[in-house]
Every structure is written in C-alpha cells, then in structure tokens.
Amino acid sequence: MKICVWGEELAAWIAAAQFAGFGNDVIKAGSEMAPADSSNRVEPGLMEQLQHSIDAGKLVSNEQEDPFSADIHWLAIGPGELEAATEIVARIAAVHTGQVLVINQSNLGSGASDQLQQRLDAERDQHVIYLPDMLQAGQAMRQFSNPDVLLVGCEHEAARIMFAALMRPFTREGTELRMMSRREAEFTKFAITGMLALRLGYINELATLADHVGVDIETVRDGMSTDPRVGPHYLAPGCGFGGQHFTQYIEGLAGLLSKTRGSTLLETVLTQNEQHKELPFRKLWQHFHCDLSGRRIAVWGLAFKPGVTTIDGAPSLKTVDALLAQGAIIQLHDPEALEEFRFHYGESEQLVYCDEPYDAVNNADALLLLTAWPEYWSPNYTELHRLMKDPVIIDGRNVYDPQLLHDLGFTYYGVGR
C-alpha cells in the first residue's frame, strides 16, 4: 500500500517506521527524515527502523515523491491544529477522484473528524477514520506492532475493510477492533484521559490528607489496589503529572464539561495538580525555616516522567523557578532531559548542570527527587550521605523506604508519608 504520514508527533514517526517496515511504500510529509524532538529520537527501536526503511527505499520524503499520490493518509499532527488538518484533507479531495482513506490520530477536538469527512466525497469511497492515539513514550513501537485492542471511529464498511487490511500485520495475534462512530471514538479518548487524571488527582489529594492524619499513603494505596474494582493503575502519589499531550486532552475535556454542563470537575483536578507540583519546594522551604538563600539544592529528575527527554509541564519547572527566586544554588541531573533543561533556562550562576547524579549531590544541603528514573531507585546510600553537606531527602515520587533512610541517618520527606 502507498501511505502518506503527516505530522511530527511521536505517533507519526511510529506509523511511518512500522508501515515501511512491513513493506508499504511510505511518504513522510515534512522536510526532515528524522524526528526533530529529542524525545522521539530516543524512542526504543524507532531510529533503527526509520534508517532501515530509508535504506530499503520504503520510506521517502515529500521532496522525493508527491504526498498526494498516496491513497491512504495518516494524520498525526499537533494538538488543536484543525485548520492545518482541514487544508490537508481539502487538498486530498481536490486531487483524488477515487477511493481514499484518511486516518486521523490527532487531538483536534470533539467532532473534528466529522468536519474532515465533510471535505471528502463518501459516494466515491473517500472516508475519514478516527483512531485514538494510545501510544506511550518508551513503549510506542511495541504498542503499535502488537496492540491488545484498537478503538476505531469508522462509519463506512468500505473504510473498515481498507483499514483492516492496512493494520493486518499488527492485528494477527487476536487484536480486538472496537468499532464505533468517529465522534464516539473521540469522546472515548477524552474520557479515558479524564479518568486517568481523576485517579491521579484523587490519590494526590489522599496523600495530602494522609500527611495530616498520620498514615502512610503507600500502605493505603496497596490496600486500595487489592480491590478489583479499584486496581493499582494510575494510583501513584507524587508531585504532580505533566506532559503536553496528556494535559491538553484533560484541558480539552475540562473545557467541554464547563461549556456544556457548567462542571468544574476536571478544572479542579488541573488546579490541584499545579499545586502538587509545588509540594517538594514547600517541604524544603519549611525544613529550612523559609530561608533558602545560598543553599545548595540537588535535583534528581527533570523530565515530566521517566523514559522521555521532554520537560513540558514537569514539576521540575515550578521547583526550579521557586528555588531561583529564593536565591538557592541548584545542582541538576537527569539522564535524558538535561540538555533540554539547559536550553530552557540557559546558563546561570545559580544553575549547575551535572552529567553524573553524584556530582549533583556533592556538598548539597538537600536532595529533591522529582522523576522516578530507574537509576535513582537504588543509590549508594553511604556515598550519598558522605557527599551531602546535610543529608535531607525530599522524595517527590515515594521511591525510597522512609525507615531505611531514617536508620541510615537521613532526614526524609515523602508524599503522604
């Protein structure tokens, strides 16, 4: 099949790599043949497959071949870019007189796929399908190639047949195709993201309450997860969630709820989440009696979550902003996001960018853990204690054992512990 992939999102690059890897002729619309986003470049397996497909001649740019010569178009463009998507589909409609399939995997808002369909001629078997983007950074190649279920917004049998043929290499192991209308699929994506946000917001509110009533939220969470109606997923208390796409989906649904129902449910979750991002700083500030001027503060973890290089909405941003305002010296480490952080903040006498985690804690008055990267889970506590000027750990992800750290001579603060 001949496919054109539009967009610079992770989903676009994954689709281009996977389809080309299974023998399709893929045109990647755009001036570059590799992701510009550093987070996408470190996605496991992605760059290798892209290069292999380019070498095999199965993946080309729109400078090498006309993107509108394809009969299948995969849209994975940026959130809210409905105007750009509409222009692309209008051009497709102007060029093609026969069968065309457009798969929209972009967050363009409720009803956007129906608007795109209006640009095409259904009588000529020109159809839009909405496929929610469920890919997670760090696992995207595997999730695309072997999905458990695909939620498909499709309203025409001809489009379903064409889509099933396109996805056949990835759905042979019993993948379930859940068919629904385009609008229902869009709303389902909103609903799933909203539910995840509510769970995260709820456990963080419980963690705040646990601090006041003197219980360990981790013990409570373990107990909650034994109930099959609750389960363990997205119940990790911490210093707030981030990520551009996750947050934008929540904002989109929050706006829809507010506009149509006057509901502030998700707006409250978003507001509380921003407050939770300040939690590590508040604990640090209180420990040092509201005076951080001249203190050396180590920060482990800058990315919004492990496995990515992006810092969009990361708790580290609020924390560092507050520390800078208080006159602290901040020694920063992250295994992947350090350069993006440096690009964001630039050079400063108050910022020390460290290539090694133990360099960041050298002579530090406190250590703040903000991202639960695997390399932070089991540090050399003896070395950590020796290097730090004051062995204070503020654990924004509840990674460490409070009793163990207390026995080793650390002052420990967690979330709801």
Image (spheres, rainbow, N blue to C red):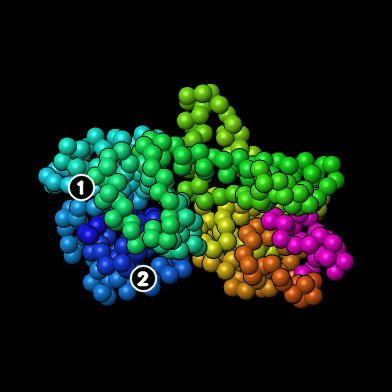
Amino acid residing under circle 2: Gln
Q: What's the residue at 76%, 49% (across, down)?
A: 223
* Rendering coords of residue 121 (x, y %): 18, 38
Q: What's the residue at 15%, 41% (across, down)?
A: 124
Q: What's the residue at 43%, 63% (across, down)?
A: 141
Q: Quadrant of residue 275?
A: top right
* Rendering coords of residue 236 (x, y %): 67, 51
- The mark lying in front, picked from 2 and 1, is 1
Provide the residue designation for mark 2. 49
Residue 327 falls within the magenta-colored stretch: no
> Does residue 388 appear in the picture of this structure?
yes
Local secondary structure at mark 1: strand
Q: Residues within 10 Å of mark 2 (few under 14, many from 20)?
A: some
Q: Quadrant of residue 351?
A: bottom right
In this rendering, would 74 be left or right of 201?
left
Magenta stretch in the rendered image = 388-417
> Does residue 221 appear in the picture of this structure?
no
Label 2 to label 1: alpha-carbon separation: 27 Å
Q: Residues within 10 Å of mark 1 (few under 14, many from 20)?
A: many
In the rendered view of the protein, which quadrant contains the N terminus?
Answer: bottom left
Amino acid residing under circle 1: Val
Between 305 and 348, the one nearer to me in the picture: 305
Residue 406 falls within the magenta-colored stretch: yes
Provide the residue designation for mark 1. 100
Of all residues, the one furthest to the front in this rendering is 174
* Rendering coords of residue 311 (x, y %): 53, 56
Q: What's the residue at 27%, 49% (across, down)?
A: 161
